[in-house]
């Protein structure tokens, strides 16, 4: 296990008061950074819109470092905001916050020992032939460690940070207040739906018994797909705060970013992600909604994808997926009337909105769905779609008097869609998305 990246270890603040004080300190740092930037612009004779001094790369870096240190619901909400606000915040801000999607600090060995003792009992080390204190991965809710059971079974133990579960409500509300007070998000943007949905989803993610159930279910769903590998759960080592799974060997996906990797390998992996996305939405109605690089491994010899981390699994009703099938079908058929009625059904449009506002929203939908409507192979790496969508989103939020936030139930689907696009863009993949989705809409 010597090839693991070294991670900074820090004590996870585990009390509500301690976490609230950390967020308060962060708010003060962001305010000071914004004031300093305002003074710099004034003395430099620059003109800038009100509030823009807070939306700097330096402030984003401050926020990202603090949240990576806090971990838990505060860091997770930062991840969600960075994705949900991809189209309404400056590029340098969302780029800096993007580090939250991949990694966080790991907890100290003292905290780790105390937590394992609480979950497994005194002398927990005797249950394992080997336990590696250096984590394989560290994210917002917990970190993963390699272990070998007494019978030789290799395990990945996902261990939840202390205090995460009981601080979800306070973290989410304090984080939302910080974003408002620091003027990071525009006042016109209603994030109440995002906050409530994030709180509900985080409660689910903090219950590892629930995640274990999702893993078992997902293994059944992809049993007919040999290209996808899902680890098995080991119940004897699984608790509400520790999830024990098969340890799956594989390479990180970023190996595919190397220039010497043949284009056909990039294309194959990119097309696998979209194939799975469409199956999740239109067939399974069950979706792993967090498609960042850290949640996948590539098995070099077989070319199979290992799917990891099912904490952010969401389920959809048949009515929900039928509405998306209708709007996708209308998009491919260039049927503006059905697109508008479907957008109203989903909640992207209000029934009595103006024709001008409806046209602007539908144009944005066409834009963000560009890979689906494109005839022939779509070049993700060469696309400037994210920039164009951001410009259009900013225009919609700030210049449309009729703007309202998307329905809360769409938040995690949006994260999957945006994340899948960004993943394929990093891979510089090229493949025919339209032909692929046609088979699901037939």
Image: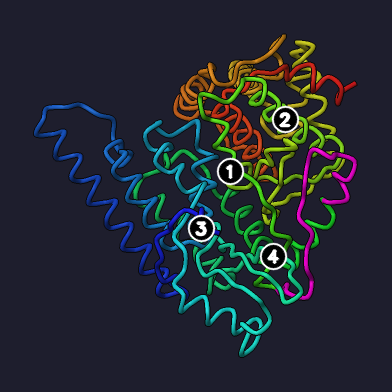
Q: Nearer the viewer, residue 218 or 300?
A: 300
Give yes or no for contact between labels 4 and 1 (Cβ–Cβ under 8 Å). Answer: no
Residue 326 position in % (x across, y down)? 82, 25
Mark 2 or mark 1, earlier in chain: 1
Alpha-carbon neighbours of circle 2 within 10 Å: few (<14), some, or many (≥20)? some
- State yes or no: residue 380 in magenta: no
Indicate the quadrant where residue 369 lies. Answer: top right
User: Residue shown at 69%/61% (left/top)?
Assistant: 204
Residue with the mark numbered 1? 252
**Label drawn at residue 192:** none
Give yes or no for contact between labels 3 and 4 (Cβ–Cβ under 8 Å). Answer: no
Q: How far is mark 3 from mark 4, CA to CA? A: 16 Å
Q: How far is mark 4 from mark 2, CA to CA? A: 29 Å
**Magenta span main SS:** loop
Q: How far is mark 2 from mark 1, CA to CA? A: 19 Å
Residue with the mark numbered 4? 155
């Amino acid at each position: 296990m010597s090839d693991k990246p070294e991670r900074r270890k820090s004590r996870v603040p585990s009390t509500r008061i301690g976490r609230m004080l950390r967020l308060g300190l962060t708010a003060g740092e962001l305010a000071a950074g914004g004031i300093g930037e305002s003074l710099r612009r004034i003395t430099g004779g620059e003109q800038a819109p009100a509030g823009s001094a807070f939306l700097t790369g330096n402030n984003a870096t401050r926020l990202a470092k603090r949240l990576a240190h806090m971990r838990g619901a505060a860091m997770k909400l930062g991840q969600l905001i960075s994705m949900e606000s991809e189209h309404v915040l400056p590029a340098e801000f969302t780029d800096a916050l993007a580090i939250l999607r991949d990694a966080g600090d790991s907890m100290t060995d003292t905290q780790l020992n105390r937590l394992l003792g609480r979950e497994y009992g005194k002398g927990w080390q005797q249950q394992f032939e080997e336990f590696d204190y250096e984590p394989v991965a560290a994210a917002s809710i917990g970190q993963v460690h390699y272990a070998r059971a007494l019978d030789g079974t290799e395990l990945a133990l996902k261990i939840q940070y202390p205090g995460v579960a009981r601080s979800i409500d306070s973290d989410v509300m304090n984080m939302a207040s910080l974003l408002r007070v620091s003027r990071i998000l525009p006042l016109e943007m209603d994030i109440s739906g995002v906050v409530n949905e994030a709180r509900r989803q985080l409660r689910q993610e903090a219950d590892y018994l629930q995640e274990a159930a999702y893993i078992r279910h997902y293994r059944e769903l992809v049993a007919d797909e040999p290209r996808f590998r899902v680890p098995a759960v080991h119940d004897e080592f699984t608790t509400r705060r520790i999830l024990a799974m098969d340890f799956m060997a594989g390479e990180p996906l970023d190996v595919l970013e190397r220039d010497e990797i043949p284009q056909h390998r990039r294309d194959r992996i990119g097309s696998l992600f979209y194939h799975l996305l469409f199956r999740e939405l239109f067939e399974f109605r069950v979706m792993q909604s967090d498609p960042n690089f850290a949640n996948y491994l590539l098995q070099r010899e077989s070319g199979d994808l290992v799917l990891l981390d099912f904490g952010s699994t969401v389920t959809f009703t048949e009515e929900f997926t039928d509405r998306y099938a209708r709007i996708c079908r209308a998009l491919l058929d260039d049927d503006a009337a059905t697109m508008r009625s479907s957008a109203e059904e989903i909640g992207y449009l209000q029934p009595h909105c103006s024709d001008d506002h409806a046209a602007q929203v539908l144009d944005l939908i066409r834009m963000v769905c560009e890979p689906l409507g494109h005839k022939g192979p779509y070049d993700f790496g060469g696309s400037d779609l994210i920039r164009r969508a951001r410009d259009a989103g900013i225009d919609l939020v700030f210049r449309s008097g009729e703007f309202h936030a998307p329905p809360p139930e769409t938040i995690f689907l949006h994260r999957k869609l945006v994340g899948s696009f960004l993943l394929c863009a990093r891979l510089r993949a090229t493949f025919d998305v339209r032909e692929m989705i046609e088979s699901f809409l037939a």
